[in-house]
Image (cartoon, grey):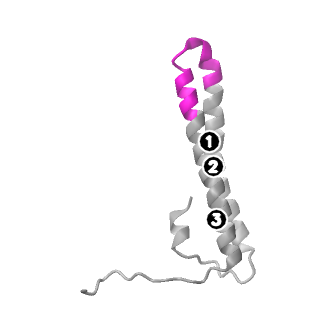
Amino acid sequence: MPPTDTPHPLVLTLGDREVVIRRRYQALSIVNDILVAIWFLVGSIMFFSESWTYTGTWFFVVGSVELLIRPVIRLARQIHLQRLPGHDGRSATESEHDF
């Protein structure tokens, strides 16, 4: 197999607590993303009927709040990880793909 110019480093600095914390925040982020999709989908469907437009507007407002919650989840995760004893402030490649 020919050598490649792109190294694939294996970083194993994650402790058990850090992995658990990351998984919990990732699950929370996924649930939040699903809720955003539901709010906007249902709100969009409600706009087909004039009698449902007011309620549909509220679904869009709730969806917008959910969109705001996503970066709050990411920030909370970062703060939580920074408070772990021995955490060096750097993370494995997982943090490059924030959820």
What x and y, as percent, mark residue 52? 61, 17
The residue sitting at 66% across, 48% down in the picture is 69
Please report whichever mark, 3 or 2, sits nearer to the chain's N-terminal start: 3
- Name above or below for residue 70 compared with residue 39: below
Instruction: Tell me where the magenta segment starts and ends, as one range.
Output: 40-56
- Whether the magenta-drawn stretch holds residue 52 is answered as yes
In this rendered view, identify the residue nearer to me: 23 or 79: 23
Q: Secondary structure at mark 2?
A: helix
The residue type indicated by label 3 comes to Arg
- Whether the magenta-drawn stretch holds residue 67 is answered as no
Asked if residue 71 shows in the view, the reply is no
Instruction: Spot the residue most to the top.
Output: 51
Q: Is residue 76 left or right of residue 12?
A: right
Mark 3: give few (<14), some (14-19) or many (20+) Cα within 10 Å.
Answer: few
* Rendered image quadrant of residue 58: top right
The residue sitting at 59% across, 52% down in the picture is 30
Contact flag, marks 1 and 2 (Cβ < 8 Å): yes
* Rendered image quadrant of residue 21: bottom right
Q: Which mark is residue 23?
A: 3
Q: Secondary structure at mark 1?
A: helix
Mark 2: give few (<14), some (14-19) or many (20+) Cα within 10 Å.
Answer: few
The residue type indicated by label 1 comes to Leu
What x and y, as percent, mark residue 55? 65, 22
Q: Which residue is mark 1?
A: 35
The residue sitting at 71% across, 67% down in the picture is 79
